[in-house]
Image: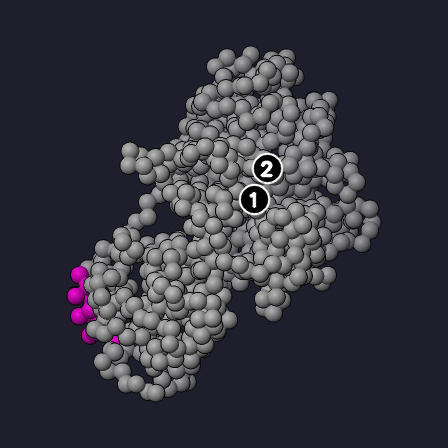
């Protein structure tokens, strides 16, 4: 339906501010590297600061991309820094340890007698276990979790953990937990006798002279760029901004100046600009690995701090990811150097970390009098190479791997975890996206060497197997700001959670499934609830309830809206209106009947019946016309598909301009991405767009896709992750064959294809009756 062009405007700026460079230090090359990198990754508002014992060494702010911030970005710009908050919370607890009020090895119940999660093990949860991510607690509490926008009290959040069961025995495994650090925050509240945010202000933020806060405020919001979410299958959208119930684990609002003061205090072993926040020996304890156990990402934690090797020396710090923001704080105590960086784009931690690490290497080189390193920038993979790599692979370990295209980019998809963007580097194709960077992989059209396994190309076979028992669970669950998608992949139920991480689920019992032993929710269970009629209505992740979202407007396979005004009135008005006047050297229109170009093209012209989104006919005849060269190309596609057992079922082709105006005026504002603006006209009006699907040549029946024709929802997106493997395989087959035939799919509708020469033809407004057969 809609096919207006998307115009991308790239804005770019660099703002340098108050820095204390070493004598003769030159950061211009670093600034140039970050500028190019931020442009490539489209980081809307990026800020960074290098810090030494005497304060900031260098700071810079950048804006880039389609969603570039309108604000000037500088060292006082406020960001939500997510899990960097945990360092502040854990240090506040260690202050209690120094005062003799807390014993790290004591059970949590000593300080919170009401803390009673179900514990099937003989080992109690200690305070230290909470802070080193070895508590065995679930990742998220039932109340006030990352998905919960109700802003409950910290007490209510911690009390809700009594309805959960430990996932593993305490002290036996490192597994990240926001719930655990929230319990730490509750201990602080109880022992200090004050609200958590007040304690943090008085005993931490004020001694460091920080302007930030664990509380949201209008003044902080005014200094903060709007955050953006980047979902798996769609373009970025504005992020929500609510106070997390797990506030101690992730609710800090801070600028680079704020975080820089914290880093400066760490470099001074606990001494802040207005007072000491911690004793040196206590900080050293926090930087000591808590046992030999490492996390699934091969990281070690001390008390709160993530510990890693960086260029041969220990780094301490933490990353942060929260709705619309990604951040990194890293300190090299041995080199007396630290870096902080943030951007207002969620799921961009890999990109932020890479810039932060590069800035550290740059500063270290200057410190040692060595040549400054340059950031190796990759580039988008060319069309020919991309076409040769797309497809399915299977590893020597039996695990599947796939390379897919989304929005013009290639992505590597494996079972479980994140999808990884592929880019072209001088040495070959590498993993280089917002989340991950890996130049050690070897990727060729025939095999992939990655993750310790060799994957060999295999044919793109049509999925087989009966998944009817899984279909009742398919769908979307939860709120708009964080949707849980349940689908089927490789014969198993599949969960896409927190917008970008996918996991296969193992069936435990009827309606009960378990996450794998890795990722965000290792070994946690997902239970589906049904109503009295037996329909699945809710997903329950360890007490976190995701209500099933309704598919609105679809009945008996047809999507319908309530038109904004009576369609008869809109048609009458549209027939009196005129298309926009265009200037240009257009070809003569040569519209022809598409059915004459292949035997296996059938018509189901929805707008000639009431079987459409308006519920009433707008065409007088069920016909389909296209420009001759588009019709010829469609005929060639049809013949290729016939060899595979499929035909093309046409729903719409040439559309008079006045009908486009009817569609626009009838459609609610929030659905207008699915209809074209008559002020620009539609590619359908040019006779160069076609709406279609597949049908089975043997049965004559339409092929079932994930969403129905004209459905105005995410299910219509060509990269929508839901449904079954077979539904997505058919959708991808249609897109691939139409693309190979010279058409491009519209980014919001799997059925809509524009002929690549559409711009050479004028807008048309002739009715079907007025059209002459030009053959």
Dot 1 or dot 2, earlier in sequence: 1
Badge 2 marks a residue whose secondary structure is loop
Q: Is residue 591 above or below residue 392?
A: below
Q: Is residue 149 visible?
A: no
Counting from the top left corner in percent of width and height, residue 447 is at: 67, 58
**Are there few (<14), some (14-19), or many (20+) residues within 10 Å of tag 1?**
some
Q: Is residue 572 magenta?
A: yes
Colour logic: one colour
Q: Nearer the viewer, residue 330 or 232?
A: 232
The N terminus: image quadrant = bottom left
The stretch of residues the image draws in magenta is 566-582
Q: Is residue 496 left or right of residue 454?
A: left
Q: Is residue 72 magenta?
A: no
Counting from the top left corner in percent of width and height, residue 577 is at: 23, 74
What is the CA distance from the residue labelled 1 to the residue labelled 2?
8 Å
Q: Is residue 118 above or below residue 366?
A: above
Counting from the top left corner in percent of width and height, residue 680 is at: 35, 71
Q: Is residue 666 above or below residue 291?
A: below
Residue 424, quarter of picture: bottom right
Badge 1 marks a residue whose secondary structure is loop
Q: Nearer the viewer, residue 524 or 102?
A: 524
Q: Nearer the viewer, residue 2 or 399?
A: 399
The residue indicated by pointer 1 is 416
Residue 333, quarter of picture: top right
The C terminus: image quadrant = bottom left
- Identify the residue shown where x is 23% and y is 55%: 562
Q: Is residue 518 visible?
A: yes
Q: Are marks 1 and 2 in contact (CB under 8 Å)?
A: yes
Counting from the top left corner in percent of width and height, residue 335 is at: 77, 38
The residue indicated by pointer 2 is 518
């Amino acid at each position: 339906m809609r096919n207006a062009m998307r115009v991308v405007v790239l804005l770019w700026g660099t703002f340098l501010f108050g820095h204390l460079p070493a004598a003769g230090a030159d950061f211009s090359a670093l600034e140039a590297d970050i500028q190019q990198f931020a442009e490539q990754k489209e980081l809307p508002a990026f800020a960074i600061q290098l810090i030494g014992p005497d304060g900031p060494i260098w700071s810079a702010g950048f804006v880039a991309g389609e969603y570039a911030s309108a604000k000037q970005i500088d060292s006082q710009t406020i960001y939500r820094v997510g899990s960097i908050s945990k360092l502040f919370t854990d240090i506040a607890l260690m202050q209690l340890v120094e005062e003799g009020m807390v014993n790290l090895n004591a059970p949590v119940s000593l300080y919170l007698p009401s803390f009673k999660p179900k514990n099937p093990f003989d080992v109690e949860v200690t305070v230290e276990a909470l802070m080193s991510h070895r508590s065995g607690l679930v990742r998220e509490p039932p109340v006030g979790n990352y998905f919960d926008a109700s802003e409950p009290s910290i007490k209510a959040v911690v009390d809700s953990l009594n309805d959960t069961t430990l996932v593993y025995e305490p002290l036996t495994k490192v597994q990240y937990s926001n719930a655990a650090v929230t319990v730490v925050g509750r201990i602080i509240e109880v022992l200090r006798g004050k609200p958590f945010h007040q304690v943090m202000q008085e005993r931490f933020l004020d001694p460091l002279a920080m302007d930030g806060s664990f509380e949201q405020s209008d003044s902080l919001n005014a200094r903060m760029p709007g955050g953006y979410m980047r979902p798996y299958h769609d373009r970025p959208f504005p992020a929500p901004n609510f106070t997390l119930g797990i506030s101690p684990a992730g609710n800090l609002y801070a600028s680079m100046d704020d975080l820089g003061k914290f880093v400066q205090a760490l470099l001074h072993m606990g001494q802040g600009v207005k007072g000491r926040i911690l004793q040196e020996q206590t900080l050293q304890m926090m930087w000591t690995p808590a046992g030999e156990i490492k996390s699934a990402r091969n990281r070690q934690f001390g008390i709160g701090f993530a510990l890693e090797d960086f260029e041969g020396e220990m780094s301490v710090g933490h990353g942060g990811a929260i709705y619309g923001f990604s951040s990194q704080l890293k300190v090299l105590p041995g080199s007396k150097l630290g870096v902080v960086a943030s951007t207002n784009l969620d799921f961009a931690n890999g990109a932020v970390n890479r810039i932060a690490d590069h800035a550290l290497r740059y500063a270290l080189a200057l410190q040692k009098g060595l040549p400054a390193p340059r950031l190796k920038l990759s580039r988008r993979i060319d069309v020919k190479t991309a076409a040769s790599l797309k497809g399915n692979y299977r590893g020597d370990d039996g695990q599947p791997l796939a390379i897919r295209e989304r929005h013009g980019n290639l992505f590597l998809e494996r079972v479980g975890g994140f999808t990884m963007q592929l880019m072209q580097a001088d040495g070959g194709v590498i993993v280089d996206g917002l989340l991950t960077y890996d130049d050690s992989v070897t990727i060729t059209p025939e095999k992939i060497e990655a993750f310790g396994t060799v994957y060999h190309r295999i044919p793109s076979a049509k999925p087989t197997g009966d998944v009817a028992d899984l279909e009742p669970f398919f769908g979307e669950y939860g709120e708009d700001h964080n949707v849980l998608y349940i689908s089927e992949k490789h014969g198993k139920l599949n969960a896409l959670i927190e917008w970008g991480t996918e996991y296969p689920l193992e069936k435990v019992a009827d309606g009960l499934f378990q996450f794998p032993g890795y990722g965000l929710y290792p070994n946690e269970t997902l239970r589906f609830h049904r109503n009295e009629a037996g329909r699945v209505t809710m997903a329950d992740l360890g007490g976190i309830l995701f209500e099933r979202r309704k598919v609105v407007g679809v009945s008996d396979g047809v999507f319908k809206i309530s038109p904004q005004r009576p369609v008869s009135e809109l048609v009458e008005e549209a027939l009196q209106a005129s298309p926009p006047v265009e200037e240009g050297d257009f070809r003569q229109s040569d519209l022809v009947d598409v059915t004459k170009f292949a035997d296996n093209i059938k018509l189901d012209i929805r707008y000639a019946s009431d079987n459409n989104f308006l519920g009433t006919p707008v065409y007088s005849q069920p016909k389909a016309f296209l420009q001759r060269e588009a019709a010829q190309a469609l005929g060639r596609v049809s013949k290729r598909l016939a060899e595979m057992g499929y035909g093309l079922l046409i729903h719409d082709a040439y559309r008079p301009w006045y009908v486009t105006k009817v569609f626009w005026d009838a459609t609610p504002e929030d659905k207008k991405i699915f209809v074209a603006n008559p002020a620009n006209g539609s590619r359908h009006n040019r006779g160069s767009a076609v709406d279609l699907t597949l049908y089975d040549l043997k049965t004559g029946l339409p092929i079932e896709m994930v969403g129905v024709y004209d459905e105005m929802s995410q299910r219509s997106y060509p990269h929508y992750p839901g449904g079954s493997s077979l539904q997505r395989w058919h959708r991808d087959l249609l897109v691939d064959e139409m693309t190979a035939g010279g058409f491009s799919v519209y980014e919001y509708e799997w059925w809509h294809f524009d002929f690549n020469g559409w711009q050479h033809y004028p807008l048309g407004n002739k009715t079907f009756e007025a059209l002459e057969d030009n053959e």
